[in-house]
Image (cartoon, rainbow, N blue to C red):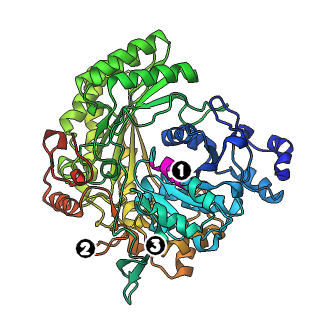
């Protein structure tokens, strides 16, 4: 602890020292006498990104609502801070009490994106905690992880002691309660892991061993103990009204990515886009009641002082009572002089009526996500939006005075051809024509941003067997579109780095052998891989070469239905048979209807009764 007394001298030397001081409005500090277990919520990126994450706010306040549990926070220090910490031999510490992480009982990482994995390793090293599970003896804290990327836990399976799969509001508390009882008995860490292995949603990699053939192809996952579950089923919170949601958020002293209060109104999605992992792992759809949302909104406005309130879900327009909810909240927000943000709205008349009222003072840009340039390819990916929807939406927007539109597409989707790329260009041309029919041609305020991401096949989706395009093919497609858009006015064209997408695919579909690659890459200096200025692809390639793994096996290789996938022992509710059926429908360009219009038999009813 004496090392941390130097913070007052160190912080003036770094950018944004408020990242490291804690003490924000609504942050929690507890007396040592009250605490039986310390949990540190770890976000493997900088403070401004982590503090914008709703899951952190929920789990932080849920754990701290328990009298004998103290949840603190830690974020990845920026490189200037890290350099000083290493020079001064200062271990990574918690924000609330400046306690070295080594003194925590449990450290829980959230895995929101694969390119943060190297930061997980770097943070453990900064905390002087051994990287590998089998090197962490009894004195070290347990290391756990959750979040969407945890649904393929194997790339971190030798680094993380256990994973929490699914929704953690109650699971985290149950684990910590059992930890307190275990700690009092003085039993071994293995005995604690054995005890929590029966909790729904808890996966312990050390209880299983991957089996490979002579060509190092994964052919099975063997249980090392008879009592270990055959499969680990995700945890689902059934009633969102009963599920914990904080009535206060921690309010930072500095600007973060999203300076606003957030209310989750809906969890899950029924639309079934075949590339979308979130649409599978968050099934089934559950809603908060209008009354509960109003109550939470009132408390958040009172307790935070934020000037913006956002309604969050995968598809806000799918909330069954969206019209009365928005009408009620807009009246309250107007009275409190607070703006209301409504992401993920459909392109229908109600959405534009609401958007026009919400943004009557200043109109920001509108975002449409056609995902693909032709109806054929939208049928392949099961995206319900049509060209008529897109063009009617653009027309409504222009008539109401909007002049800035963003369009999101994916490049490299299964069965994609250059005709589909031309379709992206044709959509942009048509939108420009619509604008000119409504507005005077001399009015030059039209701005259309075309943003393309590279398709990455994700676990537990209908496209998990598809290969992604190789980097050369993706680069050629980017260049093709760049040349087309160079000749068009009003268009800005953006696309993702093919190298980061390639690595994302490897980490998303990798097996346990990737653990060694991660550590090799980190040792060579890899961290903050999601940041363009820090990403070094050559070091990653060298790490794969050193370990003797061809990364293309995980990213650019087509897999068969009977192949053993690294995540086959994880049950997300949606069956493999259903995903195979959806994969076949993609080849047939056949559309699957929204499951709210009739059950599509995805299988989630096996573990939770859909309503």
- The secondary element bearing badge 1 is classed as helix
- The secondary element bearing badge 3 is classed as helix
Q: Which mark is residue 177?
A: 1
Kindly report the secondary structure that dominates the magenta region of the rendered protein: helix
Residue stretch rendered in magenta on the structure: 171-178
Magenta run includes residue 176? yes
- How crowded pointer 3 is (Cα within 10 Å; few <14, some 14-19, many 20+) is rated as some
**Residue 310, how many percent across, how many down?**
44, 28
Which is in the foreground here, disc 1 or disc 2? 1
Residue at (56, 41) in percent of width and height: 60
Query: CB of mark 3 within 8 Å of CB of mark 2?
Result: no
What residue sits right under mark 3 in the picture? 207
563 is higher (above) or lower (below) than 421: below
**Residue 527, how many percent across, how many down?**
61, 60
Which is in the foreground here, disc 1 or disc 3? 1
Residue at (54, 80) in percent of width and height: 547
* Residue lying farthest to the top in this orientation: 335
The answer to whether one can see residue 532 in this image is no
**Residue 188, how many percent across, how many down?**
60, 68
Magenta run includes residue 191? no
Per the model, the C-alpha gap separating discs 1 and 2 is 43 Å
**Residue 215: which quarter of the image?**
bottom left
**Residue 247, how many percent across, how many down?**
51, 28
Per the model, the C-alpha gap separating discs 1 and 3 is 22 Å
- The secondary element bearing badge 2 is classed as loop
Q: Which mark is residue 560?
A: 2
Of residues 535 and 600, the one drawn nearer to the viewer in this rendering = 600
């Amino acid at each position: 602890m004496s090392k941390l007394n130097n913070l007052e001298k160190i912080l003036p030397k770094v950018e944004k020292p408020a990242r490291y001081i804690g003490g924000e409005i609504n942050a929690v500090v507890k007396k040592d006498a009250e605490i039986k277990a310390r949990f540190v919520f770890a976000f493997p990126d900088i403070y401004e990104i982590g503090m914008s994450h709703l899951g952190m706010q929920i789990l932080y306040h849920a754990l701290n609502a328990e009298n004998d549990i103290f949840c603190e926070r830690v974020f990845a220090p920026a490189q200037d801070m890290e350099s000083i910490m290493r020079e001064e031999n200062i271990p990574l510490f918690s924000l609330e009490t400046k306690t070295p992480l080594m003194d925590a009982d449990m450290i829980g990482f959230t895995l929101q994106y694969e390119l943060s994995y190297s930061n997980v390793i770097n943070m453990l090293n900064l905390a002087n905690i051994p990287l590998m599970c089998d090197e962490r003896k009894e004195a070290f804290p347990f290391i756990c992880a959750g979040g969407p990327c945890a649904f393929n836990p194997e790339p971190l399976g030798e680094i993380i002691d256990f994973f929490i799969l699914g929704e953690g509001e109650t699971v985290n508390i149950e684990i910590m309660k059992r930890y307190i009882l275990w700690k009092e008995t003085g039993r071994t860490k293995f005995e604690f892991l054995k005890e929590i292995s029966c909790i729904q949603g808890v996966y312990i990699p050390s209880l299983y061993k991957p089996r490979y053939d002579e060509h190092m192809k994964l052919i099975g996952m063997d249980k090392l103990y008879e009592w270990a579950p055959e499969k680990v089923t995700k945890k689902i919170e059934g009633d969102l009204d009963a599920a914990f949601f904080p009535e206060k958020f921690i309010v930072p002293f500095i600007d973060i990515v999203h300076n606003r209060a957030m209310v989750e109104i809906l969890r899950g999605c029924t639309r079934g886009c075949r590339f979308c992992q979130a649409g599978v792992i968050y099934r089934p759809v559950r809603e908060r009641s209008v009354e509960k949302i109003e109550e939470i909104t009132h408390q958040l406005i009172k307790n935070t002082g934020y000037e913006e309130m956002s309604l969050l879900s995968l598809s806000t327009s799918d909330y069954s009572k969206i019209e009365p909810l928005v009408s009620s909240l807009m009246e309250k927000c107007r009275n409190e002089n607070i703006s209301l943000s409504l992401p993920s709205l459909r392109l229908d008349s109600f959405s534009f009526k609401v958007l026009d009222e919400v943004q009557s003072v200043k109109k920001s840009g509108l975002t449409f996500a056609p995902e693909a340039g032709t109806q054929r390819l939208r049928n392949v990916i099961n995206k319900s939006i049509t060209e008529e929807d897109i063009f009617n939406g653009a027309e409504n927007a222009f008539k109401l005075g909007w002049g800035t539109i963003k369009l999101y597409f994916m490049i490299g989707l299964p069965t994609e051809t250059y005709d589909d790329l031309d379709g992206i260009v044709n959509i942009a041309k048509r939108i420009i024509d619509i604008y000119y029919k409504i507005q005077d041609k001399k009015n030059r305020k039209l701005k259309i941003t075309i943003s393309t991401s590279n398709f990455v096949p994700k676990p537990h989706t209908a496209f998990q067997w598809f290969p992604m395009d190789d980097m050369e093919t993706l680069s050629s497609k980017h260049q093709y579109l760049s040349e087309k858009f160079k000749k068009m006015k009003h268009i800005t064209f953006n696309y993702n780095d093919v190298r980061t997408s390639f690595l994302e695919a490897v980490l998303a579909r990798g097996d346990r052998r990737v653990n060694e690659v991660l550590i090799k890459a980190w040792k060579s200096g890899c961290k903050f891989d999601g940041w363009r200025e820090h990403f070094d692809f050559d070091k990653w390639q060298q790490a794969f070469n050193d370990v003797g793994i061809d990364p293309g096996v995980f990213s650019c290789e087509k897999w068969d239905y009977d192949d053993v996938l690294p995540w086959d022992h994880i049950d997300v509710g949606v069956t493999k048979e259903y995903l195979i059926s959806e994969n076949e429908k993609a080849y047939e360009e056949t559309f699957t209807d929204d499951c709210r219009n009739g059950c599509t038999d995805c299988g989630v009813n096996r573990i939770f009764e859909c309503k």
